């Protein structure tokens, strides 16, 4: 053998090239991984942001008590018909309110405090109770356990989001005595120094906020505070109770005038919670109630049903139309200028902004054809038009992926063109077609703009029964909730978004399942 | 140039009843002045030839010579290609199958076809065979269909290999088995003619040998036209050979004569490997 010639594979030049190529390779791989990491973290951020916001809406604070369903209140004129009882919200509300009055007798002293206490429970919150009794009139005269949602402001307070409440353990109370002017003086309580320091930290030296002291069943407001003594005003409970258990101080830095609930209401809330009458329960009404102007009573049921009805109309129109159009264009239509034009237009339609379809629906379906406003049938038709191009394009792509040899095979044994398509091509293309259809449906489910234009943004308090009833849809509900000013709507909106996302996830799972189940190899 | 005379309307000798395993000299298919155009481009020029019953006719020639296109005229598969136009007359048992009055679907049940790449339906082996008889309503009941499936698979030499797994997908078979399945599928609709478009080009030599044996066996019952790139294959399986070049039929004759004593220079050049 002669010496290896210079054309060896391992020359310095070749090595340099190799190194360069490997570096390029590694770089490219890195870019790809970076892109995926970025996408995943964006997704995670989204889920976490919405999830944490929605989390507080998964539970709700309710006032739990037992009421005696007095016949004269719930069914005044001896009326026991379902409609009569359901209409008598005032009577049920009186029952619940009176229960609160017996719990906090001090509130009955003036009209103002009566009003304040009544605000803890919304008047309409007794509607489910009224419906329950109406459905079962034998309950009248009996004592039953009821749960009514507390007002949204109280709910937010309990959940610690607004107003902020910082609790400090004061420890055992010293001596309490009432002086000649009627004010209560607490002395010999060294634990109060902690309250002083915490308060000055929270309020930056000012004393505009409130401090409430809770002990036993009693809650008192601190009027003046020193390191071991305080002047108090009793807000609820008996004075003797205050010293029965170790004191807990609630420091609320926000001045009373700037928050929706007063010190008095907070005092009642603290007492209610302590007595176990204010409970945190699963917020099922989010799924079982219809929309309401009060966040503690609002639910998504009507919007979910509205969305489902709309989707049904969309599916019934867009899927068959899209599939048949795709089959015709792909398998039967001649290739000429006209079909080319149609193809270009279908592709263009897929890129038309959705609000344009809303305008079309408003002017054509509502204006010309006189279909009912705010109805799922109109929404469904508009969304069907919107996703039709997507369904057609996906179906055509999936038909095109069926190898032509399958068609030839069928034709060669004497199948007609129609038989070849329906017996062989369609079954093979079906998973892809359904994937496209469901992805289109998922897009339709999240559409807001076209529905706004055809009036599906109306406030709907009744669950729609048919596609021609007034209805709204989930994304539109989210839109209207998000534009409400009250803070309590924020977690509600997030929760509605989670519901919408779950529906989308379910649809996507169906897609994956269909793919796995029906995908065949050839 | 050897061209066989036009077919006689008298086809008694070529009917199903004739128990003659020898190649008959009477043609089953008689083509006259067949031309094929793809849009404006002409692919086959004025081809006239006769295809004999109970014999294998091989169409040979270099790529793009129009042999496959010509083959596809025989079961009107060119109809399915947009822009394709076939002129001329193709007589089968006295009927012009190229006439617009002839239903290509019916024709294809009498002229089966096997393709270059095995293309079984992604269904069970049984359903692959049963599909044709079912859509043509050739069978009454399950037993009848079972019999047709078995007979077709037996004739295609596949029965012993698949009889225990008829419910398995046809695509799970090996390439050679798939191609025999496709042959069985073609046989199942009881055709008189079987067209084969390079049936072995995707197969290994052993599978090819099996298909060739099968073709030789099938020749006893059917009229077979095979397009092949392999001249050895043409020599091995066919009795008649037609050589195509640039869309023209250059020469046609008995296989022995074409391979040993071609009359046209171009044929000789092609067979001896000087072009192609």
Image: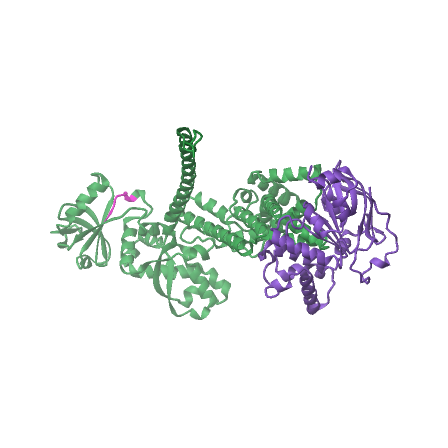
Chain colours: A green, B purple
Q: Which residue is at the front of the view, A85 or A55? A: A55
Query: Vertical placement of B245 versus B189: above or below?
Result: above
Question: Residue B275 at what x, y percent from top left?
Answer: 69, 37
Q: Quadrant of the N terminus of chain A?
A: top left
Find out whether residue A251 is within the magenta segment.
Answer: yes
Question: Residue B68 at what x, y percent from top left?
Answer: 72, 45
Q: Residue at x 66, y 55 (%)?
A: B211
Query: Vertical placement of B9 versus B269: above or below?
Result: below
Residue A432 visible in image: yes
Q: Residue at x 70, y 44 (%)?
A: A333
> What is the tally of numbered marks visible in this picture?
0
Question: Residue A87 at what x, y percent from top left?
Answer: 48, 60
Find out whether residue B25 is within the magenta segment.
Answer: no
Q: Which residues are magenta?
A: A250-256
Question: Residue A194 at what x, y percent from top left?
Answer: 16, 47
Place residue B45 in its image quadrant.
top right
Q: Which residue is at the front of the view, B7 or B142? A: B7
Which residue is at the far left? A188
Which residue is at the far front? A1
Residue A469 visible in image: no
């Amino acid at each position: 053998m002669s010496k290896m010639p210079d054309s060896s594979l391992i020359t310095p030049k070749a090595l340099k090239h190799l190194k360069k190529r490997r570096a390029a390779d590694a770089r490219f791989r890195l870019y790809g991984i970076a892109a995926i990491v970025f996408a995943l973290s964006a997704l995670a951020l989204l889920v976490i942001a919405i999830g944490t916001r929605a989390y507080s809406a998964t539970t709700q604070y309710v006032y739990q008590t037992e009421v005696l369903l007095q016949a004269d209140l719930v069914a005044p004129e001896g009326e026991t018909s379902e409609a009569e009882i359901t209409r008598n919200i005032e009577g049920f509300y009186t029952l619940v309110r009176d229960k609160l009055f017996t719990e906090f007798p001090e509130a009955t002293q003036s009209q103002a405090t009566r009003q304040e206490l009544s605000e803890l429970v919304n008047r309409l919150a007794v509607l489910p109770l009224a419906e329950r009794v109406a459905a079962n009139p034998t309950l009248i005269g009996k004592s039953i356990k009821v749960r009514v949602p507390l007002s949204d402001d109280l709910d937010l307070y309990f959940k610690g989001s607004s107003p902020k409440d910082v609790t400090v353990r004061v420890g055992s109370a010293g001596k309490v005595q009432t002086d000649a002017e009627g004010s209560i003086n607490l002395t010999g309580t060294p634990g109060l120094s902690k309250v002083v320091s915490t308060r000055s930290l929270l309020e930056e030296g000012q004393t505009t906020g409130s401090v409430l002291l809770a002990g036993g069943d009693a809650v008192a407001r601190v009027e003046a505070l020193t390191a071991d003594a305080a002047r108090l005003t009793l807000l609820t409970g008996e004075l003797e109770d205050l010293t029965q258990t170790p004191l807990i101080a609630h420091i609320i830095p926000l001045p009373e005038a700037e928050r929706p609930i007063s010190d008095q209401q907070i005092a009642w809330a603290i007492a209610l919670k302590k007595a176990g009458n204010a409970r945190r329960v699963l917020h099922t009404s989010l799924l079982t109630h219809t929309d309401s102007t009060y966040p503690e009573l609002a639910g998504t049921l009507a919007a979910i049903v509205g969305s489902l009805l709309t989707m049904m109309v969309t599916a019934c129109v867009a899927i068959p139309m899209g599939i048949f159009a795709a089959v015709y264009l792909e398998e039967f239509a001649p290739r000429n200028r006209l079909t080319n034009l149609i193809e270009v237009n279908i592709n263009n339609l897929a890129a038309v902004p959705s609000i344009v379809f809303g305008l079309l629906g408003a002017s054509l379906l509502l204006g010309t054809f006189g279909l009912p406003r705010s109805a799922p049938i109109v929404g469904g038709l508009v969304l069907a038009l919107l996703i039709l191009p997507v369904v057609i394009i996906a179906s055509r792509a999936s038909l095109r992926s069926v190898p032509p040899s399958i068609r030839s095979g069928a034709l060669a044994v004497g199948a007609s063109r129609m038989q070849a398509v329906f017996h062989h091509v369609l079954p093979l293309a079906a998973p892809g077609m359904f994937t496209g259809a469901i992805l289109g449906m998922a897009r339709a489910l999240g559409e807001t703009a076209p529905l706004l234009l055809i009036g599906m943004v109306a406030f709907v308090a009744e669950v729609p029964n048919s596609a021609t009833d007034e209805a709204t849809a989930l994304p539109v509900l989210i839109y209207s909730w998000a534009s409400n000013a009250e803070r309590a709507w924020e977690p509600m909106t997030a929760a509605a978004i989670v519901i919408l996302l779950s529906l989308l996830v379910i649809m996507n799972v169906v897609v994956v399942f269909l793919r796995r189940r029906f995908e065949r190899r050839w | 140039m050897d061209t066989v005379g036009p077919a006689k309307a008298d086809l008694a000798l070529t009917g199903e009843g004739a128990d003659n395993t020898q190649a008959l000299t009477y043609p089953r298919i008689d083509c006259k002045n067949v031309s094929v155009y793809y849009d404006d481009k002409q692919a086959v020029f004025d081809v006239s030839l006769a295809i004999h019953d109970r014999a294998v006719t091989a169409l040979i020639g270099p790529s793009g010579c129009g042999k496959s296109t010509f083959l596809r005229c025989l079961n009107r598969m060119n109809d399915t290609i947009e822009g394709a136009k076939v002129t001329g007359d193709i007589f089968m048992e006295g009927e012009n199958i190229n006439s617009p009055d002839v239903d290509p679907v019916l024709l294809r049940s009498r002229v089966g076809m096997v393709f270059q790449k095995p293309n079984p339906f992604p269904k069970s082996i049984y359903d692959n065979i049963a599909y044709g008889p079912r859509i043509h309503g050739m069978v009454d009941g399950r037993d009848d269909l079972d019999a047709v499936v078995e007979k077709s698979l037996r004739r295609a030499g596949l029965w012993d290999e698949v009889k225990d797994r008829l419910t398995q997908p046809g695509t799970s078979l090996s390439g050679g088995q798939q191609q025999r399945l496709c042959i069985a599928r073609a046989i199942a609709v009881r055709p008189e003619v079987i067209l084969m478009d390079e049936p072995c080009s995707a197969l290994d030599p052993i599978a090819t040998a099996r298909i060739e044996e099968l073709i030789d066996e099938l020749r006893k019952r059917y009229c077979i036209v095979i397009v092949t790139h392999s001249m050895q294959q043409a020599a091995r399986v066919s009795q008649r050979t037609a050589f195509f070049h640039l869309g023209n039929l250059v020469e046609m004759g008995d296989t022995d004569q074409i391979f040993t004593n071609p009359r046209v220079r171009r044929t000789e050049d092609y067979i001896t490997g000087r072009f192609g």
